[in-house]
Image (cartoon, rainbow, N blue to C red):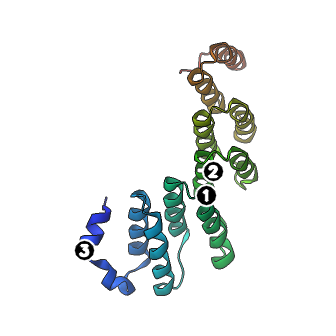
Amino acid sequence: MFRLADFERANCYSTLSNCDIGTWNAMLSVYAHNGNENEIKGLFKQFEMNMAKPNCTTFISMLVAFDHSGMVDDGWYFFHYMRNKYGFLPESEHYVCMVDLLGRAGQLNEAKDLISYMPFQRVSLACRSMFSACIMHGNLEYGEHISKFCFESNGNTDSPYVMLSNMYAILGRADDELNLISITEERNGHEHLLHT
């Protein structure tokens, strides 16, 4: 994987007008993963001036950059901009980036609402991001809510129970953890499926 210094040494800025979409997306991704949120906004402006149209991958890179830097307003702006300007409906990866960004920023209610509006049946990655945020901020109530929502959305899977059990363990709620294990074992015919 390229590092930011590799691009800077290559002095590719002088030849940006000759870049294809893959090169632009690679540069945006490098900036995103190196936490250069201000530079990525400038690079995106250059991108728009030189390219006809970005693609969905372009906006994932933008959202990852804002996720890493905690820039919620910029994240929302680009989440909506991709649809309003270019007509792209957000895909599951875009939603996951936004849920993670909101969760890390402590905006758990907004993250929970966004998950409930996701137009996808499988929301497990977004739920995992939300669980991490609930643990980070010690919000057991939202963790329990998201566990129930994920179970209802994903059907017959125990992953929401596993995540909730792990959350109980991390937050020192041993009684709740054991109770959840008991419920899950009963549901699955006494198979011990939860491991913390």
Q: Position of residue 35 (x, y in %)?
A: 43, 58
Real-space CA distance between mark 3 and mark 2, rounded to the nearest whole angstrom: 35 Å
How many residues crowd around disc 2 within 10 Å: few (fewer than 14), some, or many (20 or more)? many
91 with respect to 25 (left or right): right
User: Considering only order in the chain, which callout, 1 or 2, is on the residue closer to the N terminus?
Assistant: 1
Asked whether, in this view, residue 142 is left or right of residue 22, the answer is right
Question: Closer to the camera: disc 3 or disc 1?
Answer: 1
Image x and y of residue 162, in percent: 61, 27
Q: Nearer the viewer, residue 152 or 141?
A: 141
24 sits left or right of 112 in the view: left
Residue 53, picture quadrant: bottom right
Question: Which quarter of the picture shows residue 195?
Answer: top right
Q: Position of residue 184 (x, y in %)?
A: 68, 20
- Does the CB distance between marks 2 and 1 fall below 8 Å? yes
Is the Cβ of the residue at disc 3 closer than 8 Å to that at disc 1?
Answer: no
Q: Compared with residue 64, is residue 180 higher up or lower down, i.e. above or below?
A: above
Query: Could you tell me the amino acid type at mark 2?
Result: Leu
- Label disc, if present, on residue 102 of the rendered structure: 2
Whether residue 133 is situated above or below residue 83 in the rendered picture: above
Please name the residue shown 46% across and 86% down the image.
50
Q: Which sits in the foreground, 141 or 22?
A: 141
Question: Disc 1 designates what residue?
Answer: 72
In the image, residue 162 above or below residue 93: above
Instruction: Give SS at disc 1.
Output: helix
Q: Measure the alpha-carbon separation of dots 3 and 1.
A: 32 Å
Q: Residue visible at 27% across and 65% down?
A: 5
Q: Secondary structure at mark 3?
A: helix
Residue at image location 32% in from the left, 84% down from the top = 15
The first of marks 3 and 1 along the sequence is: 3
